[in-house]
Amino acid sequence: MRKNNVLIGVTASIAIYKALEVISLLKKKGCSIRVAMTKEATRFISPVVFQALTNSKVYVDVLEEFDDLSDTNITHISLAKWADVFAIVPATSNIIAKLANGISDDAVSLIGLATKAKKLIAPAMNSDMYLNPITISNINRLKEYGCEFVEPIEGDLACNTKGVGHIADVCDIADKIESMLYEKPLSGKNVIVTAGPTSEAIDPVRYITNKSSGKMGYALAKMAYNLGANTILISGQSCLRAPYGVDFVNVESAEEMLNALKDKIKNLDKAIVVMASAIADFKPKNYQNKKIKKRDMTNKMVIELTENPDLTKEINRFAKDNKIELFSIGFAAETNDLIQNATEKIKKKGLNFIVANDVSRSDIGFSSDENEVSIIYANGKIEKLDKMKKDVVAYEILRRIET
């Protein structure tokens, strides 16, 4: 499914504490972590802290040796071979300059020159240093060599100023590192995922909606990006953070979601659409542009509803009319007769396959981090997946795409 070994290079920046947060997030994702530090970095945080967090000896002195090496006693070579991803968090202008020019005189730059692992750099520095043409030139050179960057953001800097150079969000850094551990079977593919509920306005403060946390759809979008796809996530209201690297579109109503879908596929020759959103089947026939007052309701409110379009059918029709090759995946959230109800939707909606799940169960239903699904194909074949984390379910769904 993915590789697992992440080597974190830590350099002397006030943002060094962010490296601890990134390591903690990666450990929760199941990664094996080791750390190398420049000697200057140890004056900010002791290596003992990183050692306690990773349960591994921290490499600082270039003359040090590990006790458990099997094929060499040269530490930086051993670590260079061990790593699947080498991520420098935080990365100073000094380490960027060293890597760009082949200088290797400390633990981090030595590994940077020796490793064949994928490399990620998360810069953190004063904005004038970051925007200096020399730094920009060094960054561009490293990008040409295949290094990837999680670009710094604008924010408060250690020099009591504001500007670009503040290290990127730790969740974005951890997500990017995790994505680099995956093979890229969907590289070059366009994947569009819908997620979350749609909301249909009654008046400016009230609406009707469907129950959905968006967790399954967001997991699918994140996994599609991890697997190399050009990924778009079109989401209704959700409290979830938009996944790193994904083109995120926020919508409210079913009509807005349909328009966003059409807009995103209209210039494509082919695409994969994963319809994981909970579309409100109905909407109020008449929208009130002012808040309806309770005193005007005479103890009851009657709302006339009209049917929303079936987004899956509409987007398949739109693709056919515009000669766009579409591979479409649907979801069926059912409370009874799961397989029968889901199967009926395949031909009706023009799906390649449908993912059916029982939302009446509290252990896999709404807001749960786990799911148990059955994948039903257009040819009638049914595959049942055991209960597992939603990111694993997302991987299992996406690896079954045939394009």
Image (cartoon, grey):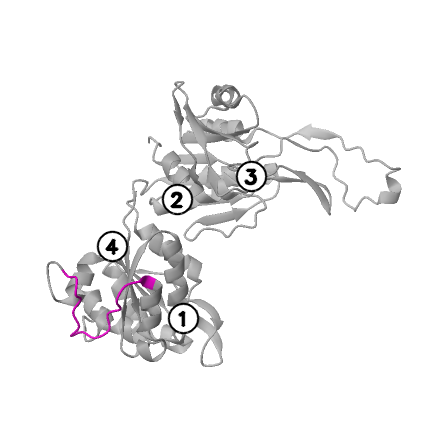
Is residue 269 something that shows in the picture? no
Q: What element carries label 1?
A: helix
Give, as a single range, the part of the protein colored magenta.
54-69
Q: Which sits earlier in the primary sequence, circle 4 or circle 2?
A: 4
| CB atoms of marks 4 and 3 within 8 Å | no
Of the numbered discs in the image, which one, if any, rests on residue 366?
A: 3
- Say few, some or many: other residues with alpha carbon within 10 Å of mark 3 (under 14 / 14 to 19 / 20 or more): many
Using a 10 Å C-alpha cutoff, classify the residue at mark 2 as few (fewer than 14 neighbours), some (14 to 19) or many (20 or more): many
User: Label 4, on which residue?
Assistant: 84
Cα separation, mark 1 vs mark 3, equals 35 Å
* 21 is higher (above) or lower (below) than 235: below
Residue 378 picture location, percent across and down: 41, 21
Asked if residue 271 can be seen in this view, the reply is: yes
What's the mark number on residue 17? Answer: 1
Mark earlier in primary sequence (3, 2) = 2
Q: In which quarter of the image is residue 62?
A: bottom left
Foreground label between 3 and 2:
3
Q: What residue type is labelled 2?
A: Met
Question: What is the spatial separation of the Cα atoms under label 4 and label 3, in whole angstroms?
Answer: 35 Å
Residue 223: assigned label: 2
Q: What element carries label 3?
A: loop
C-alpha gap between disc 4 and disc 1: 23 Å
- Name the residue type under label 4: Asp
Viewer-proximal residue among 350 and 337 = 337
Q: SS for tag 2?
A: helix
Crowding at mark 4 (Cα within 10 Å: few <14, some 14-19, many 20+): many
Quarter of the image with the N terminus in it: top left
